[in-house]
Amino acid sequence: MKKVVTIAGSDCSGGAGIQADLKTFSAHGVFGMSVIVSVVAENTSRVIDIQDITPDIIEKQIDAIFEDIEVDAVKIGMLSKEACMKAVAKKLEEYKPKNIVIDPVMYAKNGCPLMDPNSIDSLIKFIIPHADLLTPNIPEAEKITNMKINNEEDMKVASKIIYDMGCKNVLIKGGHAIGDAIDVLYDGEEYYYYKSRRINTKNTHGTGCTFSSAITANLALGMTMPNSVNKAKKYITTAIEHSLNIGKGHGPTHHFYDLYKHGLKN
């Protein structure tokens, strides 16, 4: 069985962060492990508080995994401040894992900031160069590139700017735009386009975490980058289409819809 680790924040309501990542890994048949960098007290409606884990404990969690287990892929999510970014970057340089997917989480679904705005330069300097794939949504890509993204051509320009920051592939997710959800993947030479119809639901808590974790699992399973993104796009579309009406705000996606559909539920 392939082994995949997520380095991210914990969402006590279970829809995003570490919890969404581990559910997604299980749905894809890979063994999931976790390094918690922040504990987020949140639900479907709001973020109540955030407690960051100390850099020392972040590093020790990473050491505990890598000294004992061969890791096939790494997903990195919420990194709230420069200190945790430096801790993670230090260990990426030490262990040099393959298949690193970085989702530069900056905001919760309700708009609450999850990354210190002053840490974006640190993200660019310390984290982005380690990415085999960076998966920003449009607002995140705008923050990273300091440009406004209004259309598909802007997404292409932004992906090139981010690619030049040192990552190997960039996937800008168009779910925040109006119309169909079009994502643009750039590998330094070619652009790949992934289109799906927009699903009319408010239950989209954790979609970015889930999408990037699905890509990570697919890479661990040996798929190419374009195929990993394509299969993950289908997975997240199904998960959103059958999302769960849990909570009073933005409910979670259904990570196990296909698995349950084929009989495991019974």
Image (cartoon, rainbow, N blue to C red):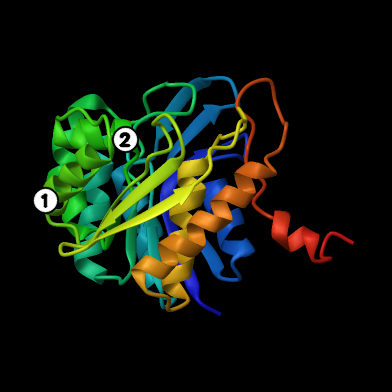
Q: Which residue is mark 2?
A: 138
- The quadrant where residue 263 appears: bottom right
Q: Are marks 2 and 1 in contact (CB under 8 Å)?
A: no
Coordinates of residue 78 in the picture (x, y in percent) = 38, 41
32, above or below 78, in the image: below
Please give the label number shown on residue 165.
1
Q: Is residue 183 left or right of residue 199?
A: left
Structural crowding at the residue carrying mark 2, measured as other residues with C-alpha within 10 Å and reported as few (<14), some (14–19) or many (≥20): many
Q: Quadrant of the C terminus?
A: bottom right
Q: What whole-number distance in Å separates the C-alpha atoms at marks 2 and 1?
A: 17 Å
How many numbered discs, if any? 2
Which of the marked residues, 2 or 1, is nearer the chain's N terminus? 2
The residue at the point 36 percent across, 38 percent down is 105
The residue at the point 47 percent across, 69 percent down is 218
Coordinates of residue 15 in the picture (x, y in percent) = 60, 39
Coordinates of residue 96 in the picture (x, y in percent) = 24, 70
Structural crowding at the residue carrying mark 1, measured as other residues with C-alpha within 10 Å and reported as few (<14), some (14–19) or many (≥20): some
Q: Quadrant of the N terminus?
A: bottom right
Query: Is residue 25 visible to the viewer in this orientation of the structure?
Result: yes
Q: Is residue 264 left or right of residue 183?
A: right
